[in-house]
Image: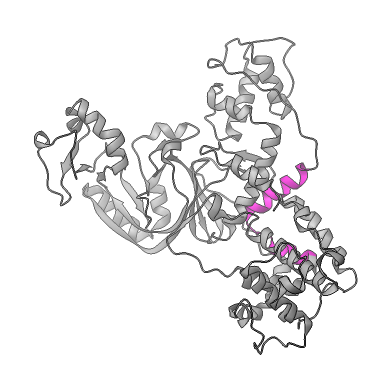
Amino acid sequence: MLAEPAQRLTVTGRSRIGVKQLFKKHAYYLSLCLLAAPLVASAENELADPVDPLPLALQQLPIDCPGLKPVPDASALALLQAFYQQQDNVQVWSVSDRVPALQAQFQHLADDGLDPSRYSLPGEQAVGGPLCTDIGISLRYLQALRELRYGRLQQSRFEPMWYAQPPLDTRNVQLLAIAGPGLQDLAGAFDAARPVSEQYRSLQKVYSAQRTQPLPHWPVLPTGSLLRPGMQDARVPGLAQRLFSEGYLASLPAHGATDYTEPLVDAVKHFQLNHSLQADGVVGAGTLVELNVSPHVRREQLRVNLERFRWLAQDMEPDSLLVNIAAAQLTVFQGGVPVWQTRTQVGRAERQTPLLKSRVTRLTLNPTWTVPPTIMREDKLPQIRRDQTFLSRQNLQVLDHNGNRLDINQIDWDSPGNILLRQDAGPRNPLGQMAVRFPNPFSVYLHDTPSQALFQKGPRAFSSGCVRVEHALQLRDLLVSPTERLRTNELLATGVTHEFRLAVPIPIMLTYWTVQADSHGRLLYAPDIYGRDPVLINAMGIKS
């Protein structure tokens, strides 16, 4: 469960599992030059002994092993060659009981939301003999480790992340450090490949327990007018059955009762809390949408969010800010431990908050607000054309691109040209007292807001892409030293705009997931505000 807004957390970090320590002594493999060698060696390559059949087969894999499917791409082939050179270019799967142990680990991948049938081993006759069979088994072994560690799907294809500093691709090096030593302990190798993040391990444990259980059944509730506490409604029996089926309601009301009573209201509030909705007991359109998500989709959500957490694990840093856009929530991590959480407001569906990783470099204190082009074109200009007093009422100045003020009466508002709208710092400024800046091409940032009442809502998709932060000055306190805090207080008191650079930039990630589990196995869902889950559910179900 997520903590209450701005609440200090006491979650302890997960220490590295023992098997990772086992593999750590093999770190010298990380410096192997094998992965930097040409992906397809020529016959004259002195690293490949033409007398040795295994490296020769790897050089001309489609010819020597024509039945091998799928044919590895360049990266997979480089990893395969390095893997066998690490093992002195000998077959590795003829060792007694090694193949059955590998097949057992493939079956356990179902607990990670992966399909074990993707890793079925090749038959000797199908691929071209025992040498090709050994290569085929190694391909499946390396494929399974790669997909368990980094994801079955390419994030860049489905939910692309923008990086201020693109990460180095060290995946093959990391996999080689696990795969080679892991031949002596296959269970340990697979556990070493699993992400160690709390998000992943907690959700994986819940999914593992649920996936073999029969799916529950609950009725689909019809739409209708708002159902408020104390009202009567023909949907009440179905609502009670729906909440009873998931344990939100201890017992069903009398048969046919249509009164929306206090026990049922409390059950609805509990459901709303667990689904990141406004917990007011009012059954409206948003609550009905979440109530009517099918049991099958709910279970598949666990599966696709395990995939998201595999993606996320590669980019997490011990000291960082993490925004879950779907839940509209920000978490501050220090030393890998979440220490503070607060609610946010994020971009609505037509103006989505982007996924990105960057670094917070400065705070804008008492910020002015320059209206972004999209907001000016779609929101402000239509209002100005209807009534030019809108400008004075909103305290908006009209400037040219050099910052010079323009006479509004001299502007053709049907075709205003290259102008800027800017609002001075102050209590009505949409950015509040502070903006948190980080490089990105989307012109988004975190900021304070005068729209505090919207933090009580759920879902909280209200902005044009930026992230509004509740208790923004408490976030400031976590980003600066005590001395810097005093200085920023002095600057805030002046009411003058000031750019304050952080002594130590802080990593920030804007991410997206729709369900997580706490350490007790309780699930917390977030509305799929951007409609991304069905695409992932479909993609994870396709074998390739």
Q: Nearer the viewer, residue 348 or 539?
A: 539
Note whether 511 is above or below 315 in the view shown: above
* 296 horizontally vs 415: left or right: right
Give residue 149's quadrant in the image.
bottom right
Residue 206 is covered by the magenta coloring:
yes
Residue 219 among those drawn in magenta? no
In screen coordinates, is 288 left or right of 500? right
Name the residue rendered at 50%, 60% in the picture: 319
**Is residue 246 among the parts visible in the rendering?**
yes
Quadrant in the picture for residue 153? bottom right
Residue occupying the point 76% across, 42% down: 210
Q: Quadrant of the N terminus?
A: top right
Can you say whether 7 is above or below 237 in the image? below
Q: Is residue 423 visible?
A: no
Q: In the picture provided, is 198 more to the left or to the right than 103?
A: left
Q: Where is residue 233 in the image (x, y as percent from the top left)?
A: 61, 11
Residue 453: x and y, percent?
40, 31
Q: Report the side of 103 relative to 525 (left or right).
A: right
Q: Which of 57 and 250 is in front in this view?
A: 57
Image quadrant where residue 407 sits: top left
Q: What stretch is highlighted in magenta?
A: 187-211
**Helix, strand or loop: magenta stretch:** helix
x, y percent for residue 344: 45, 41
- Give the residue displayed 54% in from the left and 27% down from the top: 286
Q: Which residue, as the protein is rendered here, is positioned at the far right?
A: 96
The residue nearer to you, when weighing 246 against 36, is 36
Count how many numbered circles sit on residues in the image. Answer: 0
The residue closer to the viewer here, 481 or 241, is 241
Q: Which residue is drawn at 30% across and 45% down?
A: 433
